[in-house]
Image: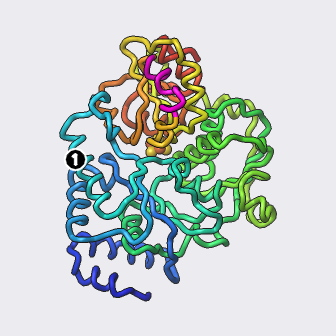
């Protein structure tokens, strides 16, 4: 293993114990995975939320110490969502001390040179991965989308291994960085029509459980499938499975370039998804029978401008029911576009909140006392169910109807 002088200095402790620990973990990852060398990365995506492994007070103190030691990022480094809306966290009922700690982590990351994207859809905000290039991304929906939609190459990094990639500009070459590990192995034939983006959530939820860490290949999917639908599919696959890549015949780049290598040669199992399978999948994602909804949260992964327009058009002139909290999550970039086109006014005049920088999974919603959440996202459904909140899963329109009426109509 070749080390640069900078890396040798960090390992000798010249930049403090935090930086030394980060690099030691990166070399452990290298050894455990049998990597033969390192690969330079075009871009790194870091975790920065207060709710995850590098989060909380300890995570904030770790990042602050790292920044104060003089560490700077060698790679271009973007940032995953945080746990608060950095501009308007008070209106989300987030405690002040929690917000203060999050702001300190943010300051530490900025001091080291991070680009403040704070979104899981950075490709909608100008960070566009290129085919065949290497990345070190941490957020699972972004990892699978970068690998599948763009044909870039990234493993599902841990918080610390992504930090190491940011500091060194490289990552161990194993897993998704190698072409031979990117062939599809589970062929999924669609024998039903997909009619909403949440259908792709239900599909991903179902297939992810079967796939585990394998690579699904979808056959018969509409060639005109929207970007938002593929974002939903990827996020769901990466939630119920640990899927890091999927292929869609005639749609995603690896399989367009070489259908046999990526969609045929490595297939060891085939499944069929028909209308009955989809009906069961959707039904099983409802974890409560309760029809009174007090939280509606949509925009996971962070919505595109197209989806924001759809929401604004529905909510225009309507009011969210008193006692219902309604969040529409997106990135700052999409929010700014929506502000200029007048969509935000339509959404916020209804009483719904356009939330940026965070989401229903990363914000401390568990402590906010909600009983039943409506969502159109499989990833949100999975994690928020784990917080002990009942979940109603359905289409975006069903969720918006629940926001306005306070009732779930399945
Ligand atoms: Fe993004 Fe939060 Fe969902 S980070 S993918 S909106 S859980």
The image quadrant of residue 11 is: bottom left
Residue at disc 1, secondary structure: helix
Furthest residue to the front?
340
Q: Residue at x 78, y 52 (%)?
A: 249
Of the pair 94 and 375, the residue shown nearer to us: 94
Left or right for 19, reference 194: left
Of the pair 184 and 38, the residue shown nearer to us: 38
Q: State whether residue 349 is above or below residue 40.
A: above
Quadrant into which the N terminus falls: bottom left
Q: Which residue is mark 1?
A: 101
The image quadrant of residue 181 is: bottom right
Q: Locate residue 367, reporting x and y percent.
A: 28, 32
Q: Residues within 10 Å of mark 1 (few under 14, many from 20)?
A: some
Quadrant into which the C terminus falls: top right
Residue 300 shows in this picture: no
Residue 348 shows in this picture: yes
Q: State whether residue 25 is above or below residue 268.
A: below
Q: State whether residue 80 is above or below residue 151.
A: above
Q: Locate residue 355, reporting x and y percent.
A: 41, 33
Query: Would you say the beta carbon of the disc 1 residue lies within 8 angstroms of ligand 1?
Result: no
The image quadrant of residue 409 is: top right
Of the pair 212 and 78, the residue shown nearer to us: 78
Q: Which residues are magenta?
A: 338-349
Q: Residue at x 70, y 64 (%)?
A: 183
Q: Locate residue 265, reporting x and y percent.
A: 78, 65
Left or right for 80, reference 129: left
């Amino acid at each position: 293993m070749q080390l640069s002088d900078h890396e040798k200095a960090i390992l000798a402790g010249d930049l403090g114990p935090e930086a030394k620990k980060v690099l030691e973990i990166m070399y452990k990852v290298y050894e455990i995975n049998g990597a033969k060398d390192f690969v330079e990365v075009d871009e790194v995506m870091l975790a920065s939320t207060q709710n995850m492994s590098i989060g909380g007070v300890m995570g904030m103190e770790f990042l602050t110490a790292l920044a104060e030691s003089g560490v700077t990022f060698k790679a271009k480094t973007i940032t995953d969502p945080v746990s608060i809306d950095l501009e308007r966290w008070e209106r989300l009922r987030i405690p002040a001390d929690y917000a203060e700690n999050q702001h300190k982590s943010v300051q530490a990351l900025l001091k080291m040179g991070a680009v403040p994207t704070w979104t899981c859809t950075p490709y909608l905000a100008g960070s566009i991965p290129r085919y065949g290039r290497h990345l070190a991304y941490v957020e699972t929906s972004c990892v699978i989308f970068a690998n599948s939609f763009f044909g870039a190459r990234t493993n599902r990094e841990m918080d610390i291994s992504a930090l190491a990639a940011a500091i060194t500009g490289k990552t161990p070459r194993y897993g998704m960085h190698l072409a031979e590990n990117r062939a599809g192995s589970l062929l999924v034939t669609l024998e039903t029509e997909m009619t909403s983006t949440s259908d792709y959530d239900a599909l991903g939820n179902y297939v992810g459980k079967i796939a585990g860490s394998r690579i699904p290949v979808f056959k018969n999917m509409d060639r005109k499938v929207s970007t938002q639908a593929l974002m939903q599919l990827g996020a769901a696959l990466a939630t119920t499975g640990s899927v890091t890549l999927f292929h869609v015949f005639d749609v995603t780049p690896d399989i367009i370039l070489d259908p046999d290598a990526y969609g045929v040669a490595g297939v060891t199992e085939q499944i069929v998804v028909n209308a009955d399978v989809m009906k069961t999948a959707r039904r099983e994602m409802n974890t409560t029978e309760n029809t009174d909804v007090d939280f509606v949260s949509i925009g996971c992964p962070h919505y595109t401008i197209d989806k924001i327009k759809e929401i604004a058009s529905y909510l225009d002139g309507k009011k969210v029911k008193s006692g219902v909290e309604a969040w529409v999550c997106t990135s700052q970039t999409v929010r700014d576009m929506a502000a200029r086109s007048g969509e935000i006014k339509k959404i916020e005049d209804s009483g719904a909140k356009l939330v940026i920088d965070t989401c229903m999974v990363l914000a401390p919603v568990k402590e906010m006392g909600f009983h039943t959440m409506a969502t159109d996202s499989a990833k949100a459904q999975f994690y928020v169910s784990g917080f002990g909140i009942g979940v109603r899963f359905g289409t975006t329109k069903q969720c918006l109807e629940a926001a306005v009426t306070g009732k779930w109509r399945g």
